[in-house]
Amino acid sequence: MIPFNKRAINIDTSFRCTLECFACQRQHFRNQNKKIPGKDLTPDQFKKIIKFFKRVSFCGTFSDPIFNIHFIDLLKICKDNNIRTEVHTAATHKPEKWWQKAFLANINAIWIFGIDGLPEDSHKHRINQDGKFLFDMMLLNKYLGSTPEWQYIIFDYNKNDTNTAKKIAKKHKLDFTLVNSQRT
């Protein structure tokens, strides 16, 4: 049995995302003309869930967590309840003020930004992503108590840019993670 202080859960908080990544589960539903399932997780529902977990990862299969209408409240609940929090995001359709507010809602949250390739090229996989804007939001790390992570999935179009990206990450004091993909 896993000790209580190590129990973790990954939560898909919504059903919305502005991206159209090729291998995303959302695309499979769209290609079959099916409605994307789910609705927004509410703060009351979330409070019930966290009674059983000390770590929460917000990482969507059908959504990007930033599109939950209560997301900033969920971050505050994690902070107030001393829940270790990770946020995986790749979407960019929120204004800078929203990002600042989200970061300040839980300065201890660990943010992982999916930017696959150099910021100006990441839209080649993450359709509709503004990689330059998301990179700039990642640089707002003065609002965070931890170093944001740049997650870079390697594809054919970006495999020759990994060293440049590593240098950019080092220059800006970002954690940098390369992820190999079987897709091209």
Image (cartoon, rainbow, N blue to C red):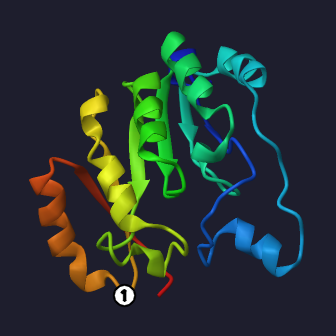
User: What is the count of numbered marks?
Assistant: 1
Q: Please tell me whether residue 148 is drawn above or below residue 106 in the rendered image.
A: below
User: Could you tell me residue 4's position as x and y percent?
Assistant: 57, 16
Residue positioned 57% across, 40% down in the render = 58
Q: Please tell me whether residue 38 is drawn above or below residue 152 in the rendered image.
A: above
Residue positioned 49% across, 58% down in the render = 90
* Helix, strand or loop under label 1: loop
Left or right of 51 in this view: 79: left
Q: Is residue 151 visible to us here?
A: no
Q: Where is the N terminus found, in terms of image quarters?
A: top right
Left or right of 127 in this view: 104: left
Q: Amino acid at mark 1?
A: Tyr
User: Could you tell me residue 26's position as x and y percent?
Assistant: 73, 67
Q: Is residue 162 visible to us here?
A: yes
User: Could you tell me residue 115's position as x and y percent?
Assistant: 39, 64
Q: Please tell me whether residue 15 is drawn above or below residue 148 in the rendered image.
A: below
Q: Please identify the quarter of the rendering in which residue 20 is found.
A: bottom right
Residue positioned 40% across, 82% down in the render = 155
Residue positioned 69% across, 37% down in the render = 69
| Closer-to-camera residue (75/153) | 75
User: Could you tell me residue 61's position as x and y percent?
Assistant: 66, 56
Q: Which residue is mark 1?
A: 157
Q: Please tell me whether residue 173 is drawn above or below residue 178 in the rendered image.
A: above
Left or right of 131 in this view: 125: right
Residue neighbourhood size for the residue with mark 1, other residues' Cα within 10 Å, grouped as few (<14), some (14–19), many (≥20):
some
